[in-house]
């Protein structure tokens, strides 16, 4: 199990702040703080605190879950601040991608067509492979490789949709509409 999986398990067990931080981006400041808090609450050293050992401890001892709940409640404000900071970093990353695109248009007077070509290839590839998988039987010896590639394509398709139609894109469009001159 990885940290994201542990985060999901903690979230399901009623620990939304710790679960959200551990399930967030790997290496995020909040995730490191959550690992430290969890290991401290369970009496583990940070070196011994692996996702598997933590989950094993929680499942073996019901008191461990209570200790984690107490720790989450005691540090609720700090955990919420860290969760918010992680989300802000994620949104900043999306904003930086859009700023890059605007900077290219301002500098060259042209759109970066590589972005659009890559997006279209991903979308067409996704629907093409989806249709192909519905109609063609995959040999058993190749199915694992095909499904791994399809998983990668699904992730890329999701990112394309998020970039072009995500909430930050909607916010950007609303901002543009608000700055239009009124009649």
Image (cartoon, rainbow, N blue to C red):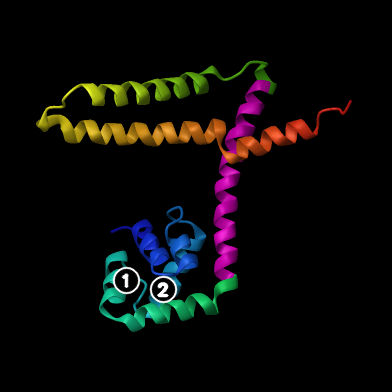
Residue in view at x 47 percent, y 65 percent: 16
**Picture coordinates of residue 140, whole percent (x, y):** 11, 32
Q: Main secondary structure of the magenta part?
A: helix
Q: Are marks 1 and 2 in contact (CB under 8 Å)?
A: yes
Residue at image point 27% right, 66% down: 52
Dot 1 or dot 2: first in sequence order is 2
Q: Residue at x 60, y 64 (%)?
A: 81
Give above or below for 61 relative to 56. below
Label drawn at residue 146: none
Task: Look at the image and give the residue range highlighted in magenta.
Answer: 78-105
- Residue 128 at x, y = what percent? 33, 20
Query: On the rendered image, what quadrant is the C terminus found in?
Result: top right
- At x 38%, y 60%, the residue is 8
Q: Is residue 43 visible?
A: no
The crowd level at tag 2 (other Cα within 10 Å; few <14, some 14-19, many 20+) is: many
- Circle 2 sits on which residue? 38
Q: Position of residue 112 (x, y in %)?
A: 57, 20
Q: Is residue 69 left or right of residue 148?
A: right
Query: Circle 1 is placed at which residue position?
Result: 54
SS at badge 2: helix
Q: Is residue 103 magenta?
A: yes
Residue 90 versus residue 2 in the image, above or below: above
**In the current view of this chain or complex, which residue is farthest to the right?**
183
Q: Is residue 124 covered in magenta?
A: no
**Can you tell which quarter of the image residue 38 is in?**
bottom left
Element carrying mark 1: helix
Foreground residue, 29 or 65?
Answer: 65
Depth order, front residue of 120/40: 120
Q: Nearer the viewer, residue 154 or 2?
A: 154
Number of numbered labels in the structure image: 2
């Amino acid at each position: 199990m990885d940290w994201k999986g542990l985060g999901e398990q903690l979230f399901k067990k009623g620990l939304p702040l710790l679960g959200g931080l551990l399930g967030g981006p790997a290496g995020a400041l909040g995730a490191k703080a959550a690992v430290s808090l969890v290991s401290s609450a369970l009496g583990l050293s940070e070196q011994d605190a692996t996702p598997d050992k933590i989950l094993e401890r929680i499942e073996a001892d019901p008191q461990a879950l209570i200790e984690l709940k107490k720790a989450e409640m005691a540090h609720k404000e700090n955990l919420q601040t860290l969760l918010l900071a992680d989300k802000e970093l994620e949104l900043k990353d999306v904003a930086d991608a859009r700023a890059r695109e605007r900077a290219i248009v301002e500098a060259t007077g042209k759109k970066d067509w590589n972005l659009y070509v890559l997006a279209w290839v991903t979308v067409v590839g996704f629907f093409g492979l989806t249709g192909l998988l519905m109609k063609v039987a995959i040999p058993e010896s190749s199915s694992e490789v095909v499904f791994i590639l399809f998983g990668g394509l699904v992730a890329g398709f999701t990112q394309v949709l998020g970039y072009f139609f995500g909430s930050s894109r909607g916010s950007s469009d609303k901002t543009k509409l608000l700055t239009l001159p009124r009649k």
